[in-house]
């Protein structure tokens, strides 16, 4: 298929907006005789007038050939090898144009990028492909545009520019197939839609509803990584709204989702919405908030509810029941593999809560010295305001903090 080409005068990407590191890589490849394109989110964000998070490069040079050009280069990845070119403050990912993924019933590729079927037949001798194939294996049309360093044009195999103009997130290919192949794309769709303010096209929305349950079978480390991105994209509240609308939330946090979707669930989204909005406010203010505090906010009301159940059914004091509730949920969270240090910190934040109800200066002196004090206090403050409770205690602690 012939791509649509937009020449330099007809688009707004200028080399000034591309980092020196990315330009060095693009020109290094071009001067060595290879095709070199800026690809992925970098092109999308520049066309939208946004600041790209990072720059990815796509080329017809193999990773070994890339390494011959750049001394500061390492090859990573087993399934599909990528070259990383390192600069002192930036790392450019260089991927060789990639062929479409093989059907799921083929064996995984051997180390040398050779595809072997179960009977040992060589199906394809490498995973590399043409620029067109590389565009088509990407997730959304707006993520599949190339910026060609040879003539500064935009190369578009998928009508990505049209979708970018209309602010539509469109899956490349058949949404059912693409979300089945890789369900993490569901979360990516939600993130891009929220962060960029794009509408997800209707057939993709329907496909997300049909396939969201597949998120439960995804690799836990990829899920965790994507959840981090969802929380830090600056539009976490909109992410939450979309997750609810598209019935994906319960497949990311099943226990919390089941609680939210229970018949008496109305009203429960209030706390969650507030917590995602708070996460966005911290982000906008540039606060580097510990992920444990973010998760504590999101899970907080649910933990408190479970604690009240435990308190009734198992006859425990509330403080102990809250610790027990938090630990139970943390054990269930194994599926998204939150690192141990973070789950430990969540438990500390939650177990510290009952201490804020005791207003004595001796107590204040003791716990304000604690390493977790600030995060626990930020939770307390959020919870007090959101639930409209402990107003006197909150005021008292604010004064202690000013005095201390
Ligand atoms: P950002 O970096 O702003 O999060 P991005 O679009 O650059 O967004 P990356 O995760 O950096 O996202 O990936 C770079 C490009 O690789 C994407 O733009 C897309 O073309 C392709 N890509 C990434 N993940 C997938 C996936 N799961 N399926 C298909 N293509 C993908
Ligand atoms: Mg990127």
Image (spheres, helix red, strand yellow):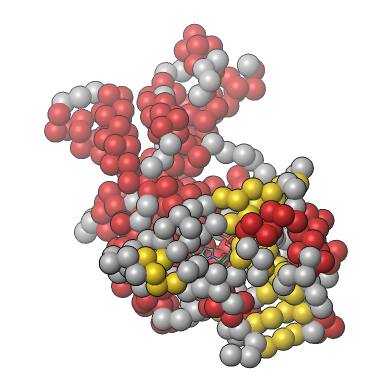
Number of marks in the rendered image: 0
Q: Is residue 388 visible?
A: no
Where's residue 267, x and y in %? 34, 55
Left or right of residue 75: residue 389: left
The answer to whether residue 142 is left or right of residue 223 is right
Residue at 65% in and 75% down: 145
Quarter assignment of residue 311:
top left
Residue 362, compared with residue 33, is above or below; it is above
Q: Quadrant of the N terminus?
A: bottom right
Q: Is residue 66 above or below residue 204?
A: above
Residue nearest the viewer, comparing 362 with 187? 187
Q: Residue sitting at 48 percent across and 61 percent down?
A: 113
Query: Is residue 127 placed above or below 63 in the rendered structure?
Result: below
Residue shown at the point (69%, 81%) measured from the top left: 155
Quarter of image, res 288: top right
Q: Position of residue 374 (x, y in %)?
A: 55, 27
Direction from residue 36 to residue 208 in the image, left or right: left
Q: Is residue 246 above or below residue 2?
A: above
Residue 124 visible from this viewpoint: yes
Q: Which quadrant of the view contains residue 16?
A: bottom right
Picture quarter with the C terminus = top right
Residue nearest the observer in this picture, 271 or 20: 20
Query: What residue sits 67% from the left and 44% below the top?
Result: 286
User: Who is closer to the viewer here, 217 or 272?
Assistant: 217
């Amino acid at each position: 298929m012939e791509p649509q080409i937009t020449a330099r005068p007809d688009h707004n990407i200028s080399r000034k907006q591309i980092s020196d590191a990315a330009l060095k890589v693009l020109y290094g490849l071009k001067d060595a005789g290879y095709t070199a394109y800026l690809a992925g989110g970098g092109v999308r964000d520049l066309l939208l007038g946004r600041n790209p998070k990072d720059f990815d490069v796509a080329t017809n040079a193999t990773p070994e050939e890339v390494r011959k050009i750049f001394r500061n280069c390492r090859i990573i990845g087993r399934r599909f090898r990528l070259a990383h070119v390192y600069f002192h403050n930036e790392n450019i990912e260089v991927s060789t144009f990639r062929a479409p993924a093989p059907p799921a019933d083929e064996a995984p590729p051997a180390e040398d990028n050779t595809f072997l079927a179960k009977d040992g037949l060589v199906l394809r001798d490498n995973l590399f492909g043409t620029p067109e194939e590389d565009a088509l294996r990407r997730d959304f049309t707006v993520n599949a545009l190339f910026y060609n360093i040879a003539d500064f044009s935009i190369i578009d195999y998928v009508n990505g520019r049209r979708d970018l103009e209309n602010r539509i997130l469109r899956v490349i290919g058949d949404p059912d197939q693409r979300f089945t192949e890789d369900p993490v794309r569901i979360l990516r769709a939600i993130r891009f839609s929220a962060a960029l303010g794009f509408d997800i096209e209707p057939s993709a929305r329907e496909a997300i509803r049909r396939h969201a349950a597949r998120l439960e079978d995804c690799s836990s480390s990829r899920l965790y990584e994507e959840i981090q991105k969802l929380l830090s994209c600056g539009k976490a509240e909109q992410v939450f709204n979309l997750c609810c609308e598209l019935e994906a939330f319960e497949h990311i946090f099943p226990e919390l989702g089941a609680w939210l979707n229970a018949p008496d669930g109305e009203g429960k989204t209030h706390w969650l919405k507030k917590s995602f909005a708070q996460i966005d406010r911290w982000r906008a203010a540039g606060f580097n908030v510990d992920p444990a505090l973010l998760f504590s906010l999101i899970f907080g009301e649910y933990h408190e509810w479970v604690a009240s159940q435990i308190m009734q059914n198992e006859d425990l004091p509330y403080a102990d029941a809250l610790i027990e509730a938090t630990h139970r949920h943390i054990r269930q969270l194994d599926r998204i593999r939150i690192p141990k240090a973070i789950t430990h910190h969540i438990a500390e934040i939650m177990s510290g809560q009952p201490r804020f109800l005791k207003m004595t200066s001796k107590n204040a002196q003791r716990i304000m010295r604690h390493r977790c004090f600030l995060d626990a206090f930020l939770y307390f403050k959020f919870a007090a305001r959101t639930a409209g409770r402990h107003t006197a205690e909150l005021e008292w602690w604010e004064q202690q903090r000013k005095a201390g």
